[in-house]
Image: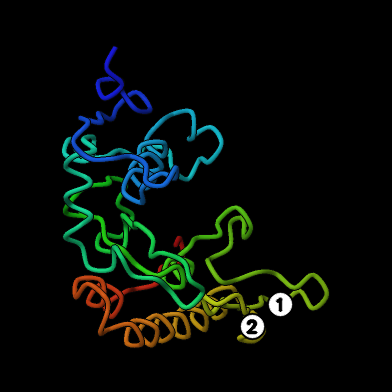
Amino acid sequence: MNKSSVLVHGIGTNGGKYPIKKDDKLTREYDLWKSMLRRCTSKLWCEHPTYIGTTCSENFKSYTLFYEWCSKQVGFRNIDEKGNSWQLDKDILIKGNKVYSEDTCVFVPQRINVLLTKRKAKRGELPIGVCLDNITRMFLAQCNNGSGTSKNLGRFKTKEKAFQAYKTFKEALIKEVANEYKEVLDYRVHEALTNYQVEETD
């Protein structure tokens, strides 16, 4: 059987037009494509429930079309401050989006991706950015700056006030980081980040 005709993760077709390896290493395009397809499978959903329901467009099921799409994207060949390639993101342009497609995906530096990462499993039923201080029984607002540093925003009597403090700080931070990268970001990403609204369930 021709290897190019074998389905990758049960949904993707290689086609054989473009290489999958260079110097015995997977090409960036193939590595991204294969990882994306894996996120669209129930096997991964069992390990990472946040990906449940994730799918990809018909075009993205084709390595040929995905490869060609990558070469045209702003940021695809960019390297961040730590020497890492920019990451493929599906839900910055459309918040909550679960479809990898040529119209919804963009490349962004890890700092931006981390800045928008949810932590629902860790915070339980409280709003994002809020936790209960077991000693004072007050609500603590904290925010990660996207570079690994967490900032304490204060303690509040209600979770609503704590969330508001977090929301105000986080939205300003997102705009600040967006402007730092403005010259190298896809303009759609900059626009989405500038208009980003933090919600309790983020």
From the image, tell me which residue sits under label 1: 138
Q: Dividing the image into 4 quarters, which one contains the N terminus?
A: top left
Q: Which mark is residue 146?
A: none
Is residue 196 positioned above or below 88 on the image? Answer: below
**N-term mark: 1 or 2:** 1
Residue 91 x, y percent position in the rendering: 32, 57
Res 110 → quadrant = bottom left
Residue sitting nearer the eye, 64 or 166: 64
Q: Amino acid at mark 1?
A: Met
**Residue 70 spot, x, y in % from top left:** 23, 54
Q: Residue at x 41, y 44 (%)?
A: 26
Quadrant for the C terminus, please. bottom left
Secondary structure of the residue carrying numbered label 1: loop
- Considering every residue shown, the one lying at the far front of the view is 23
- Residue 193 location (% of width, % of height): 30, 75
Give left or right: position of 149 versus 137.
left
| Residue at 60% in and 52% down | 121
Identify the amino acid type marked 2: Phe
Camera-nearest residue between 79 and 114 = 79
What residue is shown at x 25% (from left), y 71% (from top)? 189
Give the image location of residue 197, x and y in percent: 34, 73
Q: How is the image coloured?
A: rainbow
Decide: marks 1, 2 in contact (CB < 8 A)?
yes
How dense is the environment of label 2, judged by Cα within 10 Å: few (below 14), some, or many (20 and up)?
some
Residue indicated by mark 2: 156
**Residue at 31% of width from left, 60% of height from top?**
95
Q: Is residue 4 above or below residue 171?
A: above
- Taking the view exactly as shown, the residue that stands out farthest to the right is 135
Q: In this picture, is 103 found above or below 140? A: above
Position of 135 compared to 13: left or right?
Answer: right
The local crowd at label 1, few if under 14, some if 14 to 19, many if 20 or more residues have their Cα within 10 Å, is: some
Q: Nearer the viewer, residue 20 or 47?
A: 20
